[in-house]
């Protein structure tokens, strides 16, 4: 907006949802510290979907587990809404690489366990409704009462997605969530994920090996250099508008440009 | 949803891949044939077993008979030897060699034990009817009713043994599962009690019995309780609990890291974490331990009953051995089969329970 009236319109300061400040991770070894990450700086804005891509062992999983609170921070800070994190918590939901469902519970019970933690004061019906809503969104309304270990790997990961969204987290952390699936199922689940995400717009940070997945899902792709002392090597903004559709993205002329950019970085 | 109906997933851990298992499952007809074949093989091996037993027992019988006759010849002369020979051949019970009984003898001893049980059961009923009126009076007066105090039958002994082993099993679970859980949760505690487990685990049932005897005898002094039952069931429990204890602590301490991470992210409280995540995930191992505990309990029970002189199969075997009657040996062998079959059934029952509570496939 132009300053037509003469009074300055103060732009609301955009506060990052997630911020890493001078983040360092070292593991002590007999021969001195092994530095995985060093002085990493990264800001992720609300409603942003960020993919982190890099070779195995570059410390991207370490980064994600630190954000989740499952791994100690050696130095620096991780801030959520400008407040430093203290340990793990459901406001930073994680979709793990292995679906990590409890095999002795049904699909519904697996989701309900988390929902009851987050909405302890809701009535039983409200809690169940939340679970059913998200399980429906991932296409599992028919499998509510099946034991988790009777589901295929792909269905288990659908439950994993429902479980994470049902927590209504501030931040969604995805640790190569589709890495264990075959390519057909992977594409299905990417669509499922994007469909829910387009509705909920939860700030998301995803780790992946897969160049196409990184582009398809993210607003920004962060490329990490190989460790030790891994750092952010390059950042690529993906300008496709949302909601995205796989077919039109694959046919988009920019797609191959983005793809080449990422592959050039990874093969450097 | 596509992967919901047509399963296109390639599962790295295809434990529950139904489609696949259907495809490789043999047709029902072949299954039936396999069952039949297995049955035939089992029957055949039983026949071989009986044959070897029969040959062995008749060999031992002849060996002892000829040595007896030889001895008679040396001690008392040819006439006595011939008489003994005749006596043995006639099947007279007074002069039979006392050795490994043949299958037929064991079978008939089983029949004897059963008809003995039927007789005792009838006696009990008669006794009950006889004292029914008196007992009613006694109850009205606040006195304890008169109970049947006659000799227990073989079947009664079996049930006493099963009762003892069940109580012992319960005692071992009540100790082993809570203790195993607590030490499984805490590495320091686990290290600190490890020596105790390692030292006491291999201690023989006999020694446990003596220890329990020392304590129970003092505790129940002047209480008029049936100490032999208490002593033998506690001893059984203490001997058998170690497998469950060790397995519980192992199961609790080795919960999948991913499950614990989920629990952390969900911020489950301590008790919820134990109750909803750690214990369920340890259940397959706990039940494996319990299955071992039942087998051990049954095995040590016989030895403990024998020593504690508490009624049951153990004391039955011992009394028959001391008795030395003509069919004692055959009765001992009958007891042996009964003990084995009950042990097998107990293990099967535990296996079924293990299957029904476990989310993993149990080892058969």
Image (spheres, coloured by chain):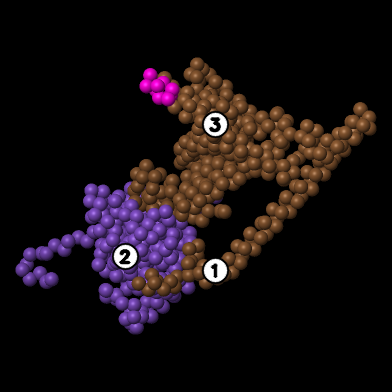
Identity of the residue furthest to the top in this view: B222
Q: Which residue bears the numbered disc 3?
A: B123
Residue B105 image position (x, y, % from top left): 72, 42
Please name the residue that numbered disc 1 is placed on.
B28
Which region of the structure is painted magenta?
Answer: B133-141
Q: Residue at x 26, y 65 (%)?
A: A201
Residue drawn at (64%, 60%) of the image: B38
**What colour is chain A?**
purple
* Closer mark to the observer between disc 1 and disc 3: 3
- Mark number for residue A105? none
Can see residue B211? yes
Q: Is residue B140 above or below residue B120?
A: above
Kindly check if marks 1 and 3 are in contact, taking CB atoms under 8 A apart as contact.
Answer: no
- For the residue pair B223 and B185, the one nearer the viewer reads as B223
> Alpha-carbon distance for marks 1 and 3?
52 Å
Q: Quadrant of residue B164?
A: top right
Q: Note the chain letter of the brown one.
A: B
Q: Is residue B237 above or below residue B42?
A: above
Q: Chain for mark 1? A: B
* Disc 2 packing (10 Å; few <14; some 14–19; many ≥20): some
Kindly indicate the quadrant of the structure image that contains residue A52.
bottom left
Q: Is residue A44 above or below residue B89?
A: below
């Amino acid at each position: 907006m132009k300053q037509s009236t003469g009074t300055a319109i103060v732009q609301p300061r955009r506060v990052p949802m997630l911020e890493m400040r001078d983040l360092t991770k070292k593991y002590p070894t007999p021969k001195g510290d092994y530095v995985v990450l060093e002085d990493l700086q990264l800001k992720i804005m609300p409603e942003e979907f960020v993919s982190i891509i890099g070779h195995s062992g570059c410390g991207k999983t370490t980064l994600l587990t630190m954000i989740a609170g499952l791994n100690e921070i050696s130095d620096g800070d991780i801030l959520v809404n400008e407040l430093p994190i203290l340990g793990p918590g459901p406001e930073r939901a994680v979709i793990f690489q292995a679906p990590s469902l409890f095999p002795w519970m049904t699909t519904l019970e697996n989701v309900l366990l988390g929902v009851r933690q987050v909405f302890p004061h809701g009535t039983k019906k409200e809690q169940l409704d939340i679970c059913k809503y998200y399980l429906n969104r991932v296409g599992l309304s028919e499998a509510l009462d099946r034991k988790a270990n009777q589901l295929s790997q792909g269905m288990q990961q659908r439950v994993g997605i429902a479980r994470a969204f049902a927590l209504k987290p501030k931040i969604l952390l995805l640790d190569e969530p589709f890495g264990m699936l075959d390519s057909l199922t992977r594409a299905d689940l990417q669509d499922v994920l994007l469909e829910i995400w387009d509705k909920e717009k939860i700030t998301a940070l995803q780790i992946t090996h897969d160049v196409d997945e990184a582009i398809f899902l993210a607003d920004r792709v962060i490329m990490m250099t190989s460790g030790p002392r891994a750092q952010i090597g390059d950042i690529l903004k993906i300008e496709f508008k949302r909601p995205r559709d796989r077919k039109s993205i694959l046919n988009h002329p920019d797609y191959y440009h983005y793809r080449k950019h990422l592959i050039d970085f990874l093969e450097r | 949803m596509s992967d919901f109906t047509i399963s296109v997933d390639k599962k790295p851990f295809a434990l529950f891949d139904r489609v696949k298992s259907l495809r490789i499952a043999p047709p029902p007809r072949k299954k039936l044939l396999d069952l039949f074949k297995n049955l035939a093989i089992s029957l055949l091996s039983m026949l071989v077993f009986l044959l070897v037993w029969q040959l062995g027992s008749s060999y031992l019988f002849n060996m002892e008979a000829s040595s007896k006759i030889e001895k008679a010849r040396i001690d008392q002369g040819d006439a006595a030897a011939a008489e003994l020979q005749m006596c043995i051949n006639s099947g007279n019970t007074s002069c039979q060699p006392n050795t490994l009984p043949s299958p037929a003898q064991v079978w008939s001893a089983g029949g004897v034990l059963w008809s003995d049980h039927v007789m005792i059961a009838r006696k009990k009923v008669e006794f009950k009817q006889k004292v029914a009126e008196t007992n009613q009076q006694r109850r009205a007066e606040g006195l304890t009713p008169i109970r049947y105090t006659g000799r227990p039958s073989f079947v009664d002994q079996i049930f006493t043994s099963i009762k003892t082993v069940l109580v012992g099993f319960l005692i071992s679970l009540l100790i082993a599962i809570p203790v195993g859980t607590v030490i499984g949760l805490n590495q320091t505690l686990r290290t600190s009690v490890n020596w105790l487990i390692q030292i006491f685990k291999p201690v023989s049932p006999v020694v446990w019995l003596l220890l329990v005897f020392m304590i129970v005898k003092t505790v129940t002094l002047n209480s008029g309780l049936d100490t032999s039952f208490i002593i033998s069931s506690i001893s059984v429990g203490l001997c058998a609990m170690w497998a469950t204890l060790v397995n519980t602590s192992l199961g609790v301490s080795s919960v999948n890291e991913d499950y614990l991470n989920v629990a952390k992210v969900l911020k489950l409280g301590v008790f919820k974490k134990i109750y909803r995540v750690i214990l369920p995930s340890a259940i397959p191992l706990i039940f494996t331990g319990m299955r071992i505990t039942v087998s051990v309990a049954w095995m040590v029970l016989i030895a403990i009953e024998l020593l504690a002189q508490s009624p049951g199969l153990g004391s039955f075997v011992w009394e028959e051995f001391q008795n030395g009657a003509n069919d004692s040996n055959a009765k001992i062998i009958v007891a042996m089969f009964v003990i084995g079959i009950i042990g097998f059934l107990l293990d099967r029952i535990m296996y079924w329970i293990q299957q029904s509570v476990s989310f993993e496939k149990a080892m058969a």
